[in-house]
Amino acid sequence: MTVNGANSNGIIVKTGGTVNIKKDTTYKPKFTVGGANSNGVYVTGGKTVAEISDTNFDVSGNGTGILVGDSGGAAKVSKIKDTTFTVNVDSAKDNDKHGTGIYMYDGKITTDDNVKISGNGDDILVTINNSKNNEIKFDGNRTGNAPSYDDAVVMKASGNNNIGFNLQDDLYYFFFY
């Protein structure tokens, strides 16, 4: 799915019910997000996506791969696994600070095996609104030994001026799990 134009969304979760975004027997979901202030997946306040798996997010311009929550309240993505975020937004240069792989406005995300977030210079991988009680739990459902690289959650950027976590607004408490 290609998301272009300003203020556009590939999938917007606004109603109840179980929402899963994952590979069927043949096709792997791919979101190419290039529009200004546009999102591949937008989970609105109070809503939940049960799973995002086997999915690719390619983000450029001022786009966002996944936006979690809004002024309507906290949202949730219960599981992200086997998913890649390729961020090429050049948002870290010139104090632009727009465009990111994941934007935590107000909510909770749990990642499982094999989530890769990458940038290639002047990119912001994850943005967190600190005025809300956001939570990102890495390898949240793992038990036992540390994972191999193929199974791990990895944030990696090449080039210069990348930002792994862009913390916005007031700073309250920030915990890594």
Image: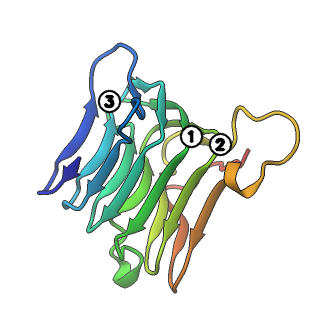
> Disc 2 residue type?
Asp
Closest to the observer, 26 or 107: 26
Q: Is mark 1 on a helix, strand or loop?
A: strand
The CA distance from mark 3 to mark 1 is: 27 Å
Closest to the observer, 51 or 149: 149
> Disc 1 residue type?
Lys
Q: Where is residue 22 in the image (x, y as percent from the top left)?
A: 42, 33
Identify the mark at residue 72; answer none if there is no mark.
3
**Which residue position is annotated with label 1?**
81
**Nearer to us: label 3 or label 2:** 2
Q: Alpha-carbon neighbours of circle 3 within 10 Å: few (<14), some, or many (≥20)?
A: few
Q: Where is residue 146 in the image (x, y as percent from the top left)?
A: 84, 48
The residue lying furthest to the left in this view is: 5
**Which residue position is annotated with label 2?**
113
The quarter holding residue 32 reads bottom left
Q: What element carries label 2?
A: loop
Q: Is mark 3 on a helix, strand or loop?
A: loop
The quadrant of the picture occupied by the C terminus is top right
What residue is drawn where x is 48% and y is 47%?
131
In the image, residue 11 sits, relative to residue 91, either above or below, namely: above
Mark 3 and mark 1 residues within 8 Å of each other at the beta carbon: no
Mark 1 and mark 2 residues within 8 Å of each other at the beta carbon: yes
Q: Where is residue 3 in the image (x, y as percent from the top left)?
A: 20, 52
> Disc 3 residue type?
Gly
**Nearer to us: label 3 or label 1:** 1
For this view, does 90 lie left or right of residue 54?
left
For this view, does 138 lie left or right of residue 39?
right
What residue is drawn where x is 36% and y is 29%?
45
Compare marks 3 and 1 and give the one earlier in the sequence: 3
What residue is drawn where x is 59% and y is 68%?
156
Q: Does the rendering let one see residue 103? A: yes
